[in-house]
């Protein structure tokens, strides 16, 4: 099942912010530049993440974003935020009464698996391997 583009952007942005926030706030312009994004595509994602309390933003010359609790944010949290968790069938293709229940169970198993991956854990793995989301090839979250 493909994830919405906003979900991919959220994963890339939050992991990038989590990796770089020890050096101060991460500017959206840096994320936009590295991932070659249109800032109009990223800003609504950052606003949604901010409203959900996943990131915190500060305006101004020293402004930017941080992830205040990367140890408690999972990839499943990001998927849920950008898909309709209340109605999994809205996210899944309609496969009729025979296949839809199976797809819904598979989707729940998928989310359970993603809930094992926190931003802090992914950040630590990247940094241990010497990878840097702003200076290396953009991450690909295709599963």
Image (cartoon, grey):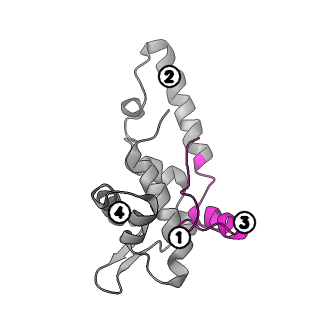
Closer to us: mark 1 or mark 2?
Answer: 1
What kind of element bears circle 1?
helix
SS under mark 2: helix
Q: CA distance from mark 4 to mark 2?
A: 33 Å
Residue 39 within the magenta-colored segment of the rendering: no
Chain-order first, disc 3 or disc 1? 1
| Secondary element at tag 4 | helix
Q: Nearer the viewer, mark 3 or mark 2?
A: 3
For label 2, count other residues whose C-alpha is less than 10 Å away and answer few (under 14), some (14-19) or many (20+).
few
Whole-percent x, y for residue 129 in the image: 72, 66
- Segment tinted magenta in the rendering: 114-143
Residue holding disc 4 = 46
Is the C-beta separation of discs 3 and 4 under 8 Å? Answer: no
State the separation of the CA atoms marked 3 and 1: 15 Å
Up-down relation of residue 16 to residue 10 (above or below): below
Label 3 secondary element = loop
Residue that carries the numbered disc 3 in the rendered image? 129
Magenta stretch prevailing secondary structure: loop
Q: Residue furthest right?
A: 129
> Eyeballing the image, is 5 above or below 30?
above
Distance of label 3 from label 2 (alpha carbons): 40 Å
Mark with earlier residue (1, 4):
1
Dot 4 or dot 2, earlier in sequence: 4
Question: At x 47% / y 71%, what residue is drawn?
Answer: 67
Residue 135: image quadrant is bottom right
Give the percent coordinates (x, y) of residue 116: 63, 53
Left of 122 or right of it: where is 101?
left
Say few, some or many: other residues with alpha carbon within 10 Å of mark 4 (under 14 / 14 to 19 / 20 or more). Answer: many
Q: Is residue 121 left or right of residue 91?
A: right
Splitting the image into 4 quarters, where does residue 4 fall?
top left
Question: Nearer the N terminus, badge 3 or badge 2?
Answer: 2
């Amino acid at each position: 099942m493909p994830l919405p583009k906003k979900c991919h952007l959220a994963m890339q942005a939050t992991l990038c912010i989590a990796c770089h926030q020890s050096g101060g706030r991460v500017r959206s312009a840096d994320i936009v530049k590295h991932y070659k994004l249109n800032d109009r595509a990223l800003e609504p994602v950052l606003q949604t993440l901010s409203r959900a309390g996943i990131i915190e933003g500060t305006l101004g010359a020293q402004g930017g974003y941080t992830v205040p609790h990367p140890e408690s944010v999972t990839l499943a949290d990001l998927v849920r935020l950008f898909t309709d968790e209340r109605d999994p069938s809205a996210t899944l293709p309609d496969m009729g009464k025979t296949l839809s229940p199976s797809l819904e169970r598979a989707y729940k198993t998928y989310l359970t698996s993603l809930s094992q991956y926190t931003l802090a854990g992914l950040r630590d793995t990247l940094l241990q391997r010497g990878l840097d989301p702003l200076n290396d090839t953009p991450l690909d979250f295709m599963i």
